[in-house]
Amino acid sequence: MNLEDIATVKSILSQPQKIVIIPHKNPDGDAIGSCLGLYCFLKSLKQEVSVIAPNDYPKFLKWMPKNEVVLNFEKENSQAKKRLEEATVIFTLDFNDLSRTGQLEAILKDKQADFIMIDHHQQPKDYARVTYSDVSMSSTCEMVYNFIEYLGGLDKIDASIATNLYTGIMTDTGSFKYRSTSSRTHKVVSDLIDRGADNMEIHRQVFDTNSPSRLHLLGVALSNMVILQEYKTAYITLSQDELDANNFKKGDTEGFVNYGLTLEGIVFAVIFIENKEEGIIKISFRSVGDFSVNEFARKHFNGGGHDNAAGGRSDTNMETTIENFNEILKTYKSKLNP
Ligand code: 5GP
Ligand code: MN
């Protein structure tokens, strides 16, 4: 954030405001962690603050400190709408295009308020009064830590803020192993532990709460995996029937896509998950090295994200989606075999 933006934010927060914080649709650990970390910080400044999530999120994120304040726009619609109407400041966290907020988009694009974006995704849109965008960052949670530091507020970081920010950094870096994990990330995380984040407990809460049906679904996913050695690609499909047969709950497929990348020689991994209710196939893309899944998702599947982790969707059925994917893949043969 530059000095001018820091001054703008300081001046906004020097007045009492009605603040709403918003993560992207289908929020992940970084989205919820950054919103709740910022929520706790702004509350410590005596501001009036709400968090509104576009829709529900998995149980493995619902233990986080202050989770109970999050309003679900789909379920608590009238209350959420009221907070939005009253809002004077809107923080948008862990996304950079209002289209990532689902049904909230229609309200946000006409809303008069000071928008502040904090985000690390590529190609940010220009909708905010203050845009703090840095694609080199491990996570939005690391940026919220920086944001607090810019405002001279590090001493306000208590165990609740530290736990929320630690969780998002941990989930977005694959437990501190992805390329965006810097020495600075480790310094931030070290400080968060000193300020009360219980790292072992956080890891346990997020990763060691499997249900038997999730593990059975993982078994189905792994047996459905197709490996295309000549494209250094592995992909998984999960149909709605397979999800239903395994008692699917939101979040159960989290992390499945990464298994493809654990195969020797594979640099591109994809999972296609059917969602009959929305009439789409939701797709997650992951890569190692220089193959940009952000570009791939943006160009072919109406999505985007980061160089090594992106998402997208297809509006055709699974069979057609896979046929298309295989056709598209042919045009990437040299990029996948540099
Ligand atoms: P995931 O595959 O875990 O849903 O998402 C991976 C990354 O891509 C995340 O940073 C997420 O925010 C982003 N992402 C997921 N789906 C979409 C999408 O449909 N559009 C865009 N622009 N980004 C997405
Ligand atoms: Mn993120």
Image: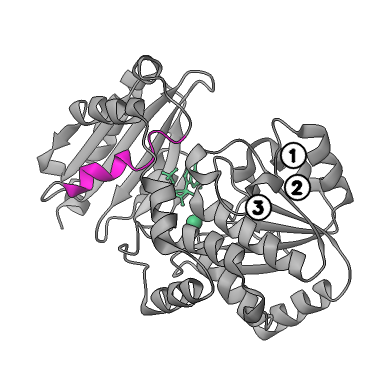
Task: Give the residue pinned by disc 3.
Answer: 66
Task: Classify residue 79 as left or right of residue 100.
Answer: right
Mark 1: few/some/many CA within 10 Å (<14, 14-19, 20+): few
Magenta residues? 251-262
The answer to whether mark 2 and mark 1 are in CB contact below 8 A is yes
Q: Is residue 308 above or below residue 279?
A: below
Q: Which is nearer the eye, 52 or 268?
A: 52
Residue under the image location 45 percent in, 36 percent down: 251
How is the model colour-coded?
one colour
In the rendered structure, which amino acid carries the disc numbered 3?
A: Lys
Q: Is residue 171 visible?
A: no
Task: Classify residue 73 as left or right of residue 296.
Answer: right
Task: Give the residue pinned by disc 1.
Answer: 106
Numbered marks: total: 3
Of the numbered discs 3 and 1, the one sitting upstream in the chain is: 3
Image quadrant occupied by the C terminus? bottom left
Q: Position of residue 179 (x, y in %)?
A: 32, 66
Q: Is residue 297 magenta?
A: no
Which callout, 3 or 2, points to the residue nearer the camera? 3
Residue under the image location 78 percent in, 71 percent down: 45
Mark 2: few/some/many CA within 10 Å (<14, 14-19, 20+): few
In the rendered structure, which amino acid carries the disc numbered 1?
A: Ala
Residue under the image location 48 percent in, 58 percent down: 167
Q: Position of residue 188 (x, y in %)?
A: 47, 76
Which callout, 3 or 1, points to the residue nearer the camera? 3
Residue under the image location 79 percent in, 40 percent down: 80
> Residue 116's quadrant in the figure?
bottom right
Task: Give the residue pinned by disc 2.
Answer: 109
What secondary structure is marked by label 2? Answer: helix
